[in-house]
Image (cartoon, grey):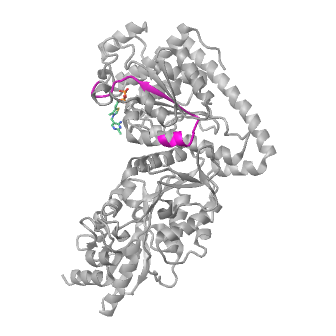
Amino acid sequence: MSQIPSNALAEKAVNTIRMLAADGVQKANSGHPGMPMGAADMAFVLWSRHLRFDPAEPRWIDRDRFILSAGHGSMLLYSLLHLAGFDLSLDDLQNFRQVGSRTPGHPEFGHTPGVEVTSGPLGQGFANGVGFALGQAMLSAQLGPGNPVEDHWVYAIVSDGDLMEGVSAEAASFAGHNKLGRLVYLYDDNQITIDGSTSLAFSGEDVTGRFEAYGWQVQSVDGRDREGISRAIEAAKADLSRPSLVRVHTTIGYGSPNKHGKSSSHGAPLGEEELKAAKEFLGWPQEPRFLVPDDVRALWSEVVRDRKAEHAAWQRRAEGWRAANPEKAKLLDAHVNRTVPPDIAARLLEGADASDATRKLSQAVAQKAAALVPSLVGGSADLAESNLTDIKGAGGVGPGQYAGRNVHYGIREHAMGAIANGLAFDGNHIPFVGTFFVFSDYMRPPVRIAALARLQTIYVWTHDSIFLGEDGPTHQPVEHLTALRAIPNLHVVRPADGVEVALAWAHALTRREGPTGLVLTRQKIARIERTAGFDAAQVLRGGYLVAGSPGAKVTLVATGSELATAQGAAALLARKGIATRLVSVPCLACFEAQPEAWRREVIPAGQRVAVVEAARGIEWWKLAGSDGLVIGIDRFGASAPEKALAEEYGFTPEKVAARIEGWLST
Ligand SMILES: Cc1ncc(C[n+]2csc(CCOP(=O)(O)OP(=O)(O)O)c2C)c(N)n1
């Protein structure tokens, strides 16, 4: 541990953070100075005295994780990363919020070394941290005592906004239940949000009581009391049986004589005059801007030198552990590399040529996948029985029991998505999480972040259409395929049978640059008959020809359960002398990413195209074209048996064939 700096030097180091943030926001003429200025003391204490890191190896597996959940305070994080020697220069800080800079408005994972999560949508980072702690506990339990990931902590700075968002409540409840004691969250309790005082909307709430009731340890400390903050962090770590929240009472915009304690310092530059006044107030030179005094630089070099020594000591221990535990070392590597066998598609395809409810087919494939991919961990929001997500024989995760591979997220879809993202950000697991497709709405914010941050998160969304039946329109997705397909970099895959399900899983397991949603039926699907010579690899292209009459001028496109319906319709049309080609498009985004030659082979020019999908269908018009037909659904579903709904909504082979015949005759 480095020498604790004198009070004067510590004060200077804290002011360095404040002024880097204020200068950065001023230069960009945009951003949030108040939070960094108010939280600079706690950030300095945490980073200089407690946080374990090595700037030369930002992904060191036993580093402490630091999450800035209040991502709008990004200049705080960028200043810390710069001072702590990460690959982020003063030039980068000066380019805050500019085109192509490494210092975007809110932290973006994969964009800036040392940024652990993409944060900004309040509450997400809070829940991501829970995923990090869960991942640490699970991997550590698999590896046994003395392992090389045993000893790290998950720290976060969270704000009023984070704690008001429901997702943090879900995640806190989950963390308390599961006794994730390696979480240490510092709450920037400044009682100010954008609209003004928290008394406008957050007054009567007993945050301490609420978190204690969740099973957290809660402490309170003054935000300028650096020793007190440090002691609180020690006390949080001393209680391994509970996560910890340290309420740090701060003043937003501290140092700005006219804006401190006010929402005016939250989200706008201080302004030249006020910046000048703040520098005067803090005894800081007016020029140069972005000043890092030499003694502050020296302080940080000392901190970094000590941290590197800790890393080196860890490396020696880890090598010893590897030598003594070769099998466990392999397991660790399989997690860290998220190893997937190169022939995964072929392995999952073995015996997969079956027809059934696609959720059931998925269950069978997931068992095989879990045996082949040690880092795969499952879970569901209390619907494991319906989503069929359990990894059989692998055991559940619960309080103090982390060696299982099935996470019980409870009925907390939003936090489930964000916790899964935490696992994926951390990178040592491939998480898959299940719920009813209609409730993908409840987890949409983390799905969007997963797509943006290029995370390998897998969603098992079952009960994928009105054909789930009697539960009725509250449970019947209609617009969800369209809504999710609108998210860039999310692959929505709606397979039709065992072959497509196996390849959908293979795709999800090998796709490292973004999330995949598997959209699966509750009901059984009739067998799909493919033309001889079918090559399973074609499924991975997102769209392929299932069957076709030579010379046909009409192509029927369908997905999931409607592929069998369209196949039935094609047979009826053939009897009337109307030849068709049948195309399956289990993944529209994958198909659209194919070279034009493939797309043209699947849907040749000059074809009339009819798409059949029991959903909103808006996105299919690009394939159908202006003389095409989209047989979809433009109203909500209804509570009735599946077969009655198929009649009512026009999704029997007969009704589909009749629609197509009518369309062709116009
Ligand atoms: C989900 C979400 N809703 C709204 C916002 C817009 N927003 C950014 S900061 C903020 C509130 C700021 O209050 P607080 O969290 O206390 O931060 P501080 O004022 O202390 O900087 C809001 C509403 C957001 N980033 N995320």
- In the image, 97 versus 46, the foreground residue is 46
Horizontal arrangement in the rendering, residue 291 relative to residue 348 (left or right): left
Query: Above or below — where is 458 with respect to 352?
Result: above
- Answer whether residue 426 is visible to the viewer in this image: yes
Q: Position of residue 70 (x, y in %)?
A: 42, 32
**On screen, 603 above or below 166?**
below
Q: Dividing the picture into quarters, in which one does residue 629 lie?
A: bottom left
Whether the magenta-drawn stretch holds residue 230 is answered as no
**What count of labels does the image hold?**
0
Q: Residue furthest left?
A: 666
**Residue at coordinates 35% horizontally, 70% vertically from top-left?**
469
Q: Quadrant of residue 203?
A: top left
> Outermost residue toward the right?
324
Whether residue 58 is situated above or below residue 364 in the rendered picture: above
Q: Is residue 183 magenta?
A: yes
Q: Residue at x 50, y 14 (%)?
A: 225
Pick the quarter of the image with the C terminus. bottom left
Which residues lie in the magenta part?
173-196
Asked whether the viewer can see residue 91, the reply is no
Find residue 9 and report its image quarter.
Answer: top right
Identify the residue shown where x is 39% and y is 47%.
445
Image quadrant, ligand 1: top left
Q: Position of residue 10 (x, y in %)?
A: 54, 12
Quadrant where the image shows the N terminus: top right
User: Could you tell me residue 124's position as x and y percent?
Assistant: 43, 40
Q: Is residue 196 left or right of residue 327?
A: left
Residue 552 image offset from top left, x and y in percent:
34, 85
Q: Nearer the viewer, residue 260 or 524?
A: 524
Which residue: 42% across, 73% down?
Answer: 523
